[in-house]
Amino acid sequence: MEAGKSLDGVKIGIIGAGLSGLSLADLAVRKKAVVFVSDLGSRKDAAADEMASKGIDFEFEGHSPRLWESDMIVLSSGISPSAPAVKKAQEMGIPVLGELDFVAPYLNGRLIGVTGSNGKSTTTALAGHLIQGLGRRGAAIGNIGKPVADYADSDLEFLAIELSSFQLYWAKKLPVEVSIVTNLDPDHLDWHGSYGNYVAAKANLLKMQNPGSWAIGQKRDLGFFKDIPSVCLVGLGWGTDGPEKDNRIEMGEREALLWLEDECRVLFHYDRLPLLGRHNLENAAMAMAAVELLGLGAEKAETLLESFPALPHRCEAVTSICGVDYVDDSKGTNVAASVTALGSLPGVKVVILGGQGKGEEYGSLAEAVKKHARVAIVMGAERERIVEALQQGGVERILPARDMEEAVLQAFQEARPGETVLLSPACTSWDAYPNYKERGRHFQRLVRSIREGNEVGNTQAWD
């Protein structure tokens, strides 16, 4: 049965009782489907209470035979195609839909799709901020923390949607008007199996677009999309390299320009943006270009950049102590993100690395650390692998740390006035924290404890 048609009486099984799964279940109930949510994980009381209050049947800790009685199975965000439940459903001939294809028929308004390896949340939030500031009804949704299904049947004019490679793997029916691929670097290789598969999932965003619609990406990445002739590509690059008549975003010395064939439009002047780092100038340029391509006017939107706050844990300035700046980039959960942070922030760094890895290699990280940092402090489950890569890369000062407390203490002792202590782990947080946010908050608490004059040697005082 095709999603988007009448769901009255249709038996829908939803795999996953996380944020997106609950939102999908709520939408299906509103469409009068018979809903059953099945989750392999342990019982989540808050989720169970929410489903019970809405009359939704559910189970935790495994998939019972009832799941296979569904007319359709819908996957919440992050469910892998190799999951046994997915394979069994396909073997039984039960239609399997990803989150986006189930919701797409119920989305109204003009859609901006944002994906990429890093910078997705900032770019999505910026696009939403600009649209709202221009007096239009819009929202920034998706993986930024607001499930897409929550916006089914909304009357908003514009939706800027952050989209993960997990979601896009399954997607075939989300026709965005402007797509943005912030950048492409190896990530989630443990999920996709290879970099080629990862890029192919990202490319699905462009394949769903209508002919003649716009796609924005890095110039270096456009080759991945050359076989998608229906979209008009706009490549971002620094300087004036490239054919003169290319559609492009030109990052100049003081301003970003949008060239559409031989016509040039100023997107914004860099001093308007309060965010740290060269990479955030790229994020802003892409968001501003989307606003311009939608016909909303970058010239009118430029002043709105000044009121946009940095998103938490993304090169977020924490404080300064004795002439040393402390920056929280806990969202730097892959090598490319940390390499970008190291190169984008000015000056010499003392960098804190490590956590739980994603199967990446650390050669490029070692190169960036050697070039931009004086000291590397390494913690977490990947400590030995990262230390080995740094040593092979010629990094001279490498300090192992047991945990965040010791890492911050060492950074405080090592950093010199004029330098920056940067937490950008290049790894997930799952070896020690439930998520990158808790890791970043812990880092900030420790730093502020130092600033407030707590006993530096007593790490228990920091908690």
Image: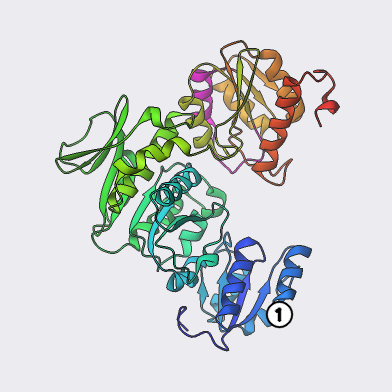
Front position in the image: 109 or 133: 133
Q: Is residue 336 magenta?
A: no
Q: Quadrant of residue 445?
A: top right
Q: Is residue 369 magenta?
A: yes
The residue that mark 1 highlights is 55
The answer to whether residue 151 of the structure is visible from this angle is: yes
Which residue is most to the top?
Answer: 417
Along the horizontal axis of the image, is 193 left or right of 377? Answer: left
Please identify the quadrant where the C terminus is shown: top right
Q: Quadrant of residue 400?
A: top right
Is 177 situated above or below 440?
below
Front position in the image: 33 or 428: 33
Is 215 situated above or below 305?
below
Q: Amino acid at mark 1?
A: Gly
Along the horizontal axis of the image, is 407 left or right of 366? Answer: right
- Range of residues picked out in magenta: 354-374
Q: In the rendering, at what x and y percent does residue 144 appear?
A: 54, 51
